[in-house]
Image: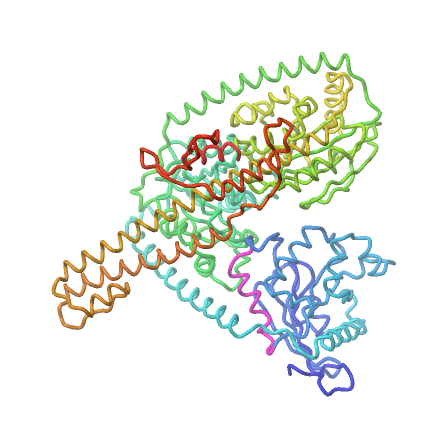
Amino acid sequence: MEHDLEGSESAVLSEVRLILIGGRWAGKSVSGNTILRKERFECGRTRTSQTEVRHALVEGRRLVVVDAPGWSRSLSLAEIPEGDKRRFKLNASRCPPGPHAFLLVVPVDSAFSAESRRTVEEHMKLLGERVWRHTVVLFTCGDFLGGKTIEQHIESEGDSLRWLTERCRNRYHVFNNKDRTDYGQVTRLLQEVDEVAWDNGGKCYQVDEQTLSAIKEKEREVTERAGVRRKMSEEQRRQMRTLIPEESKTLPELRVVLLGSRTVGKTSVGNSILGCKEQEDGKRTARSVARQGFVGETEITIVDTPGWWKGFSVLDTPEATREEVTRSPFLCLPGPHVFLLAIDVDASFNANHLDAVTSHVELLGEEVWERTIVVFTRGDWLGTHTVEEYIEGEGEALRSLVDRCGNRYHVIDNKNADDGTQIAELLEKITETVAGNGWDCFVPDVKVFQTIQERRSSVVEAAQMRQSQVVAKRKFLRDNSKELPELMIVMLGQKTFGKSATGNNLLRKEVFAPSENESCQVEKGEVARRLITVIDTPGWQRNPSDCTKEGDQEILRGLSLSPSGVHAVLLVVPLDLTFREAQRATLEDRLNLFGAGVWKHAVVLFTYGDNLADESVEEHIEREHGALRWLIDKCENRYHVVNNVKKTDTGQVVELFEKIEEMVAGNGGRLFRPEMDDAQLRIEENFGRRQLKLVLKQRLQEEYMRRELELMAGFRETLVQLLAEVKGSLAGPKSKLLTKGIGHKRKDGKEKEDFLYLKFCHEIEKLDKLIKEKTSTLLRSSMDIFVPDLKAESPGPSSGANPTSHFGNVLSWLSTLQIGRNVDNQMTLNFSQTSGYRSVGPHELDSDLEEDS
């Protein structure tokens, strides 16, 4: 069937194989029923959890329609569960030899945003570039168009939807699934599919056999390991049940602490346990809070804690959140019996997530793991697959977490809250865990609580002092300020800090796309009787070493887009992440490019204001790392908070404008505009300095690697010599084996001798493998080292020398630099006595790089 159209005079397929793909609730299943002209796929509020295949004879053709599970709004491949990725690739094999077309379902009754585009793009990457040749956009909810054509809808939606249709070579079709009697819409779709097949020479999309075989083998291994884990869990539970007397099967009192990242459903787990059915308000849990209730005869206290950002280490979490997690056990004294760690099964779990979980959980101490149960939320996402398959299929990070929790885990389907059996089973597992810990609870250290209370008092006191200073200064400036008819504002900050959303809030309209813009954008609007001009600049990277010269130059261009200058430079800082030394250094590095005068016009604009809850922004400033207080002091106590969720709150925007007008009055009405030539020189110099440090570090790392390889080679020779001494009677053949680093088991009956021999050979083999890997890494590193061949003239003694050529000469000279050792046997870069530099060790270089980052 691969060449259905070959030799055919008309481009009509006798068999049509289609795969419906798209997001959840896009209308895939109902579209499948429309195509097949009968109810073959289940529709409604139930998600398609597994791939389903249906057949029918329509208009004389045999139709094969595959309904694939809808994807979640994952914006990157890294966020998609490994099992979902494998099964998504397998969909094409469900209608052999492969589909003629993928129908990418997009509803017209909801916006197709930049995030929607990224989600589609990331999922299509799983199928390879060639999938676009076989894809048709199937728009659903056609009745929503009203009098508009689909072409008018595409144009009105914006760049993202236009990109999608163009990517599919302008192949698209519209369904009105409410009108099943309109058979013409199916006929026209099939004609569109005929054209796709004709354009592809009659060939269908196929997964290559090697990939298909590898995925199926992986699925088989996962299923096998999942079965082993389930048996282990059942045996473990059986043993724990033997520790529970009949009279203790129901605990009179139970104290539980909920832990987990944001948006994983912690609060829903607590509500399910307590049987609360009221609608959740969707607000973030900002404070640890205890709730009580009865489940049967057991009085249960559940403490819900603030979540951390998924994949972010505890070092990125604000101090207030860390403090609330640490305080949580004191809300259910004498202490919690168990900790329930929530993990959502509709998302990936990788090494970053593991680091985030462990670093946050261990705020409470390592002994917490003995009382922790992993609770997997959104169990409906698993469909027919078991949670053990998710654990084993997701990778080493999740397996190690579950193992660290003693293989204790449970699944909750929050959408099936009326199913009392899942909560009953969870309570049984909790009782078994309590029994396994000798019926004791986790007793928190009272000194920790005292430290928290003392710190809170000092924070409140410092916050009140800062607030009073700000109020006094604003009162003085307000008397000398006036409402300006026009305000020009530029926004600076790291990527994902909320600049674009804030710009939209300031202008009271959606003009900045919340995507990673790479160029400056200027927008204007009349707000609160003022003409507001907002310049949104590209965000810089989290890691300063990833910042580029082009990025800095584009930011500089943004500052020049207002010829007369700008009234305010808004430094965007989120309240939901901590602001530490690395962020401070990167921000200072960027601003110093534009001259010291920029600080006189800078205001710290805190985003994610909803993160504060009942805490004042001054308390957040005083509680956080000293780097944030440095920034606030550098801006002379100019700061403001916006909550971009409350878009209707115009008061927060007007107050910001008033603060800017007060700052302008304090600056004597002067606007800020950098000296472009000076700023450009500083950008060049900064880039050259960064290159210099990176090359220095790489040269030292290479030398370290070489010395390490020398030591490993020496150790290998020592092992060979030791083995030769132990096996002194061995003759030539074994020596040959040793020199090759390969061990073969002897068959002379000397078991102990063979065991020792094999053990030595095994260690030598491992060492050989490691040496080979490190040698390969060293070779790659040597080839990748970047020392530009800049042949600018020597700047000479003139103080006006071009810093770019200076750094170019330094980099060229660096390529011939020798690395030696000092009196303490530490590696150093050896400078000549006349160079003007002293020898420097790697620890000093790392320290400099750390300051730079």
Q: Is residue 175 visible?
A: no
**Percent position of residue 476, x then y:** 71, 11
The answer to whether one can see residue 850 in this image is yes
Q: Specify whether 735 is left or right of 358.
A: left
Residue closest to the eye, 116 or 559: 559
**Residue 8 image position (x, y, % from top left):** 74, 86
Overall secondary structure of the magenta section: helix
Q: Is residue 124 left or right of residue 578?
A: right
Which residue is located at x 75 percent, y 15 percent?
478
Q: Nearer the viewer, residue 586 or 128?
A: 586
Magenta stretch, residue numbers: 80-97
Q: Position of residue 503 (x, y in %)?
A: 73, 36
At which x and y percent is residue 345? 51, 54
Q: Is residue 88 magenta?
A: yes
Residue 140 higher or lower than 297, as above or below? below
Q: Residue at x 64, y 32 (%)?
A: 682
Q: Is residue 114 above or below residue 488?
A: below
